[in-house]
Amino acid sequence: MKNFLLLFSIFFICFSCKQESTSNAKEEKTSVQEKEYKYKLTPFTASPEFPDAKISSMEYKNGTFNFGIDATTYELGAQTTDAPQKMCANSAKGQHIHLIVDNAPYAAKYVSSFDHDVEDGDHYLLAFLSRSYHESIKTDAAHVAYKTTVKNKSIEKVEEITKPMIFYSRPKGTYVDGDTEKVMLDFYPVNAELGKVFKVLATINGEEHLLDKWQPYYIEGLPMGENNITLTLVDDKGLVIDTPLNPVTRTFVLVNSEPKK
């Protein structure tokens, strides 16, 4: 009888511990699932693809950039056909080139030849074709990315970028009224296919969102006034990749011009 009671006691204790462990696991899982974010990120709606859009050449000489643009469906200065449906900031000047030097904000250029000041020295340079609402065309042909040496306002040396890198594109500048409701987040990885190996940690006003797919996102819920986003290229363990210009931070502003009632 004593042995029976002893065995029963051991069984009861083990069963109770197992139930408590299962309960804790469920509570922890629920806690993770119910984590609330102030800012909502959703994938951008599908956009015209422009599969033949190509930057065929790039030259920088005496302070002037000259790009060779080959395309039958893509045209600088034209409005992207679905711009009215995107419900986000759109350039009235149309489609354009995003030119990014190092981690500076991009310059939007609506023609293939233009003056632009680049200081003498070594620079990472990215240029890609953009839709009128600033979304990048995400193909190999529609961009160029180089490590360059500039001297006397001309490119003296060009090298391929071999390290994985992340370039920030949007949001940028000031958003007013209706453009503040859905703000597009867009970025450009180089030598870094997002998924199993690389991810982008987007820190929006201190709130972290881990992105494992290269696509633009709508950001909703941003407050009026100054906002900050930091993009960090990380590995599959969440560790920061040791590479140039990583991370990169931008500040942009949302404004409501309508008078308060």
Image (cartoon, rainbow, N blue to C red):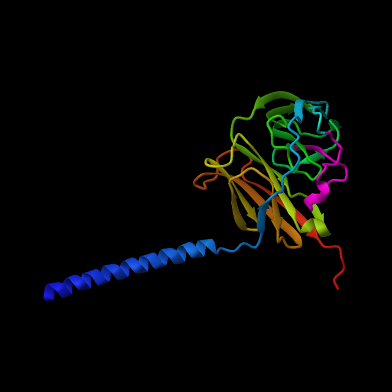
Residue positioned 40% across, 68% down in the render: 23
User: Does the magenta-highlighted stretch encompass residue 209?
Assistant: no
The C terminus, quarter of image: bottom right
Q: Quadrant of residue 12?
A: bottom left
Quarter holding the N terminus is bottom left
Residue span colored magenta: 75-99
Locate residue 224: give its quadrant. Answer: bottom right
Q: Position of residue 108 (x, y in %)?
A: 81, 40
Residue 89 relative to residue 242: left or right? right
* Closer to the camera in the image, 69 or 205: 69
What residue appears at the point 51 percent right and 61 percent down from the top-left corner?
32
Residue 234 position in % (x across, y down): 55, 44
- In this rendering, is residue 67 above or below 18? above
Whether 84 is among the magenta residues is yes
Q: Main secondary structure of the magenta part?
A: loop
The mark tally for this picture is 0
Name the side, left or right, on which 23 lies relative to 196. left
Residue 197 visible in the shown view:
yes
The image shows residue 97, relative to residue 254, as above or below, that is: above
Q: What x and y, as percent, mark residue 254?
A: 78, 58
Q: Is residue 58 above or below residue 32?
A: above
Q: Position of residue 146 (x, y in %)?
A: 68, 29
Look at 72% across and 48% down and name the residue there: 45
The answer to whether one can see residue 89 in this image is no
Depth check, front residue: 25 or 177: 25
